Every structure is written in C-alpha cells, then in structure tokens.
C-alpha cells in the first residue's frame, strides 16, 4: 500500500468514527461539531484521492473551530451540563489520541516525501488535524470544568480573585 492509499484509509476511519460520535450525541450542538469533523475527514480523503489521480488539489479550511465556538457559547449559558457529556468523555479522549497520531503521521510522511506538492498537502492536513485536536481538547476541558472548579474551590473563595 502506498502512502496516499494509507492516508486515505486513515481519513475514512476518522470519518466513520466522527459519524458514530455524531449519531450517538444527544445534544444538537455536539452533533454539529462531530458532523463537521467527519466532513473534514471526507474532505481530506477527497483531496488525497484527487492527488493520487493526478489532479491538482485545493482544500478549503476547516470550519470545525468556528462551529465549536458557537456550541460552547450556547452551553456556557446553561450551568447544568448534560450527563451525556460526562458519559462520552472517554470517547472524546480516544479521539484526542487519534488526532495526535494523525498529526504525527502526516508530519512524518511529509519529512519522507520528496514531492514538494505532496509535502505541502501533508503539512496542510496535519495542521487541520491539529485544529481537530484543539476542538476535542476544548470539549474535554468543558466537560471537566465542574471538576476543576470544585478542586480550586478547596483552596479558597474564587469569587474574591
């Protein structure tokens, strides 16, 4: 299997994972975030496929970060976090690991590649995978927020800071 085929396979696996997360998310905002991440993985796949077929590639920037900002703004208005967020935390943490591995994979592939066009594409996808990591990290941080708040409360009155 060549490097482009391998990368395409990884992107399809990522897409399937995010589609499953979107399907299992009970909150519309989370469905939106995970659907956007799945769409990004499909976009990466399509870009890699076009390159493999000898076409020129162009790739729009990810919108996942902007989508997540909107969702978090809505969730911050409601102080009661849905139980589903806490229950899905392990799945989000697994997705963080997968994104970390994807970034490393694309950066390593870029180092080994001689074609500057393919190097540029690999680095571009690695950068988008970093954005995905950022979104997921924010989801995890948001879910953990009450726990951190309770830990800090033990050290004094935060309202006075």
Image (tube, rainbow, N blue to C red):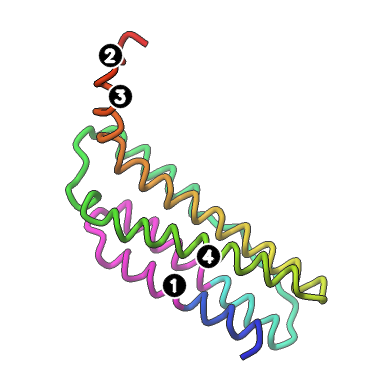
Q: Which mark is residue 15?
A: 1
Report x, y in % for residue 92. Answer: 35, 57
Q: Nearer the viewer, mark 1 or mark 3?
A: 3
Q: Which residue is tagged 3?
A: 152
Q: Which mark is residue 71?
A: none
Q: CA distance from mark 4 to mark 1?
A: 15 Å
What residue is at 37 percent from the left and 47 percent from the top?
A: 139
Q: Earlier in the sequence, mark 2 or mark 1?
A: 1
What residue is at 54 percent from the left and 53 percent from the top?
A: 131
Q: Quick one: label 1, few (<14), some, or many (20+) residues within 10 Å? A: many
What residue is at 34 percent from the left and 41 percent from the top?
A: 142
Quadrant where the N terminus lies? bottom right
What segment is highlighted magenta in the picture? 13-42
Q: Quadrant of residue 6?
A: bottom right
Report x, y in % for residue 43. Answer: 55, 71
Quick check: marks 3 and 4 in contact, CB under 8 Å?
A: no
Q: Which residue is tagged 4?
A: 101
**SS under mark 1:** helix
Quick check: marks 1 and 3 in contact, CB under 8 Å?
A: no
């Amino acid at each position: 299997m060549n490097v482009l085929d391998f990368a395409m396979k990884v992107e399809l696996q990522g897409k399937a994972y995010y589609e499953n997360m979107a399907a299992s998310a009970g909150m519309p905002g989370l469905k939106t975030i995970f659907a956007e991440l799945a769409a990004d993985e499909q976009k990466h796949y399509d870009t890699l496929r076009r390159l493999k077929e000898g076409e020129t590639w162009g790739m729009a920037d990810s919108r996942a970060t902007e989508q997540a900002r909107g969702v978090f703004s809505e969730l911050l208005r409601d102080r009661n976090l849905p139980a589903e967020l806490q229950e899905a935390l392990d799945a989000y943490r697994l997705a963080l690991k997968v994104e970390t591995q994807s970034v490393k994979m694309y950066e390593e592939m870029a180092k080994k590649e001689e074609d500057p066009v393919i190097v540029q594409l690999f680095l571009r996808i690695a950068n988008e995978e970093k954005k995905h990591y950022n979104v997921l990290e924010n989801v995890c941080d948001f879910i953990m927020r009450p726990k951190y708040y309770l830990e800090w409360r033990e050290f004094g009155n935060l309202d006075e800071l």
